[in-house]
Each structure stands twice: as C-alpha cells, then as structure tokens.
Image (cartoon, rainbow, N blue to C red):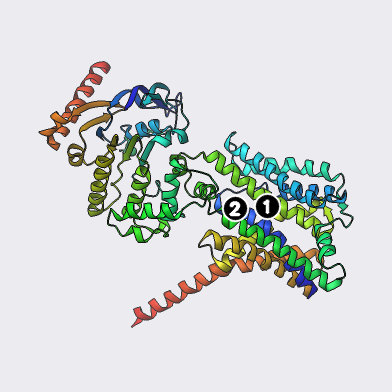
Amino acid sequence: MQLYITALQEGFLYGIMALGIFISLRILNIPDLTTEGSFGFGLSIAAVLAAKGFVITSILLAVIAGAAAGFTTGFLQTKLSIHPVLAGIITMSGLYSINLLCLGAANMSLNDNTLFRVMKEAFFPNSSGMDSKIFYAVISGFICLLIMVILIWFFRTHFGMCIRATGDNEQMVRSSSINVNITKTAGLCIANALVALSGACIAHAQNYADIHSSNGTLVVGLASVIIGEALLGKRSIVIGILSAVTGSIAYRFIVAFVLSYNICGANMMKLMCALVVAVTLSIPAVKNQMAVLKLKKEAKKHADH
Amino acid sequence: MLIIKNASKIFSKGTVNEHTALRELNLLVEEGEFVTIVGSNGAGKSTLFNAVCGTFLLDAGSICLDDRNITFMAEHKRARHIGRLYQDTMKGTAPNLTIEENLALAYSRSKRGPFRIAVSKKERQLYRDALAAYEMGLEDRLETKVGLLSGGQRQIVALLMATLVPPKLLLLDEHTAALDPAAAEKVMKITKDIVRHNHLTTLMITHNLKSALTTGNRTIMMDGGSIIFDISEEERKNMTIEDLMHMYSQKRHVELDNDRMLFS
Ligand SMILES: Nc1ncnc2c1ncn2[C@@H]1O[C@H](COP(=O)(O)OP(=O)(O)OP(=O)(O)O)[C@@H](O)[C@H]1O
Ligand SMILES: [Mg+2]
C-alpha cells in the first residue's frame, strides 16, 4: 500500500515533467532533448538552495533556471537556425557540467529543508508514517493540479493560442503577422520551466539530490505522454493535459507493481518497466491487427459462398 | 498601391541547379485594382507572391507597398498588410485549431493584450455573422476543428481570415484549383464580393483563362520570370481565350527564333 501511495506522489511530480514534454512534443511539435538537462538543472538548484534553508526560493529559482534552459534551446533553434534535436542536445550536454558545478558533488542531502516537511509542520505537525505519506501525495497532487489549471487557462489565452498554432501551421502563423521565433521560444521556456519544477519537486520529495536522477527522465516523460494518450486519447488540449498526468501516474503504478512482486532484482527493474511500457503501448496496434484479421476472415467467408 | 521594380531572384546561384525565377520584373498595381495573373507552370507566379510576402529576400530590385519600402521587412511584419490564399487548402489554416480560433488568430492583427482569452463573446458574434453571410452553414460550427472541414469550407475560412481585417494587398494563388466546380464557383463568387466590398487591391493567379479574362480589371501573363503581356480592361473586353493563347504562342515563337539565330 505504502508503495502505491509513494507511486501516486511520484506520478504527480513526474507528471509536471510529462506536461512539459507534452508542450514541446505535442503542442509545439518539436522534439526537445533539453529535458534531461533542465530536469537536472532544477533538481540541483533546488537542492543547493534548500540545503541552505531557502525552501520556497529554491523552487522559484529552479523554475526560472528551467525557463532559461528552454530559452537557450529556443535561441539556438530560431536565431541560429540549429536543428531542433541538435539544439536540445547542445543545451543538455552543456547543462550536465553546470549541474555538476552547481551541486558541487555527485549527490547531496537537503537536510530536511524540504517543501513537504515545511508544509507538514504547518498543517499536521504530529502526523507520522503512513499519514504523512498520504499528506505528501495530496500536496503533490495539489501542485500538479494547480499547474494543470494554469496551463488550461494559458492555452485558451491569445498568446497560448498563438503557441498552439505555431506547432500546427507555422507558415500560417507567420502570415497572421505573429513572430514565430517568439512563440516557439516562449513555448520551450514554459516546457523546460515545468521540467525543472518537476526536478525541484523530486529533490524536495526525496530530501536528496543525485546528479544521476535526471538520467532516463526524457524516456519516462515520453512514455508517460504516450501511455496517457493510449488511455485517454488526444482530442483536445484539455484532454492532452489530463492524459499526460494520467500517463505519468500509470507509469509509476507499473513501476510499483513490478517492484512489489520483486520478480527480479533491482537491476532488472528498468528492463521490466521497458517491457511493460512496450506492451501497454502496443495495445492499440494489436487491437487494430485483430480487427483487420477479423475483416479478412469475414470477407473470405462471403467469397466462399 | 504595389510597386515592384527590377525584381530578380536566382535560386541555387552558382550551382548546376541555378534557376532564374524572377527576371528584372516590373509591376505597378494601382490602389483597388484587381489583377489576374496567368502563365505556364514554372513561370514564376508563386515566386512573385513569395517575394512580395517576404518568404525570401530579392537578389536585386525593390518592393513598395503604399509608399512604404518593404524590400527588407521581416515576413511576419509585412503580413500585417498582406492577405494570402494558397491552392493547398491546408496551408492557410491551422488544422487542429477550431474555426473560431483560426479566425481569432487572423484577427490578432488588430489585437489587444496577449493574456486575454483568445475568443471573446463579442468576437464570436462577429465571426458568426461574417460566416453566416456565405451561407455555408459554418456559422454553427465555430468550435469544429478546421482540419475536419472539406476543402471548400476550409478555403472559405482561409478567405475570411485573410480579409477579416482588410489587407492593403490580397494575394490569391490558384485558390480554387483544388475545389470541385461547384465549390470553386462559390468560393470565386464570395472572393469577388469581398474584394468589391472592401475595395481590396488584389492579385489572383489562375490557370483558368476564361476566369482570368472575366475576373477583375486587368490581366498579366508571366513567362520565364518576367511579365510578357499586360492587358488592360479595355483591351480585354473583346478578347477570347484563343486570342490569349495565340498571343502566347506567337511570343514563344519569336523568342525561339531569336534563340535559334543566336545559336546558329
Ligand atoms: N525555393 C526554391 N528553390 C529553388 N527553386 C525554386 C524555389 N521556388 C521556386 N523555384 C523554381 O522557380 C520556378 C518558378 O516556380 P513558381 O512556383 O513560381 O512557378 P509558378 O508560376 O507558380 O508555377 P505553377 O503554375 O506550377 O504554380 C520553378 O522552376 C521552381 O522550380
Ligand atoms: Mg504556383
């Protein structure tokens, strides 16, 4: 049970990252590889500042740092015309060194100066064990929900609509006298700010930051977005936003499930998760194949008559 | 008023693929004039539009729109004054946005704060009324994604987007060529209405010679990146399609003969 509560919390927090990836991948239609860099950037900035006691500031600055990372990638893409994939890789690898520099070591503790601890002391100072786990999950859910509401509002505003249109038909947006360099860069800033916020929240939730926690986050985020779409579809922006978070939670539950049965050692964890995700993602294609087979069978039956 | 002076554009300069798409082209279009443009495939008609819109910069020459030199102005900045429609009905609209969002995007040329809700109630009414005038039933489908519409319906939306804020110049690039005859006729009629109603200065590319001679008040023919004929309203009146074809082939013959003399 405890495993699943923690999975829910992580699902919400990594869900913020999935929202960032949803924005770059689905709304802007840009494969943005900055993700792992900005996740680590948010994580390390939040950890360093929180360890010194600046709990709220650490999160705000992490968000700004993420936006700066997104701006860098956007600048490389638009002003310097570097291929989007390369621009992301450049920023990401540059950030790797910056993150190490920032953290000062491969890992560090936040010394209990975490957002979650502060909130718990403010509201439920006496809770412990299971209760506090549930409380942490609720706070995480609240943060994630807040972000979702802001995003849904934002993408209905004029500027948000321009960003959506840029991913849809760039030429047409330009013909509507809108500067697509601005809309693209702004979109990347928002996406990476969210990814960095997710990294910061993860550092706070774990009370611990490790430079390697950002490894593989991009794949996890992509998987979340795609699992979410397989579950809920992608009819509109609102559904897309919902499904990114749903996908993230589903992914964490899958991981918890694999862990709880302890079928394999911790080393095989990633492989098991990869398998489960691959199976989940292949469901639509398999369904499709089945339908085609059925159609062929029917057609044959009629031909025989 | 549009003034194009000595416009030249050479693609892939200095390679084996070097191609002169615009050859010292001169064109003056008066305010409120409706010019139809004809010419064979590859004559440079779309390239002329691209140059005016700023898709690329000219190698030489200048473009002025209403006394303003726009030769080096950024594409999205000139777009404020230019409306454009393409043959490909997907090009002029964003398929995953709804009809009203597409219209709101075009309407943003005259727009206030970026963080207002994109489609206000007042605007929705404006779009509804504008669409209702075309009797296509689109006014009741404002929240339908444009990608789900038929080509003709999409082109109506694109046309409205291009003219919602009357532009100084309207460029129509074979905008009815992908539509079935009935839809093409309807879109053409609506186009003429809009142009007349707003006194828009318009250039229209078409391969339909009949419609070229009967639409607007002037016809020009392009070939090899320059204008080879400029036919005024008076001259056009008694002209048939055969006359136009004849003029074209004669011009071609003369040029071929010249080439032969050159190479013999
Ligand atoms: N971006 C480009 N790069 C290289 N060549 C180009 C480019 N754009 C156009 N051209 C060339 O310029 C010539 C004129 O093309 P353009 O599209 O203007 O023709 P068009 O008159 O519009 O013909 P159509 O009636 O087929 O639309 C063509 O030979 C084309 O290959
Ligand atoms: Mg063309």
First in sequence, mark 2 or 1: give its number: 2
Measured along the vertical axis of the image, is residue B43 above or below residue A46? above
Residue bearing mark 2: A23
The chain under label 1 reads A
- Per the image, label 1 sits on a secondary structure element best described as helix
Q: Residue at x 38, y 55 (%)?
A: B125
How many labels were placed on the picture? 2
Quadrant of residue B83 in the image?
top left
Q: Whole-percent x and y of residue A106?
A: 85, 49
Q: Whole-percent x and y of residue B198?
A: 29, 40
Q: Whole-percent x and y of residue A147?
A: 65, 57
Q: Residue at x 22, y 27 (%)?
A: B230
The residue sitting at the left extreme is B238
Tag 2–tag 1 contact (CB < 8 Å): yes
Structural distance between the alpha carbons of marks 2 and 1: 10 Å
- Can I make out residue A221 in this image? no
Left or right: residue A59 compared with residue B72: right
Residue bearing mark 1: A194
The chain under label 2 reads A
Q: Quadrant of ligand 1?
A: top left
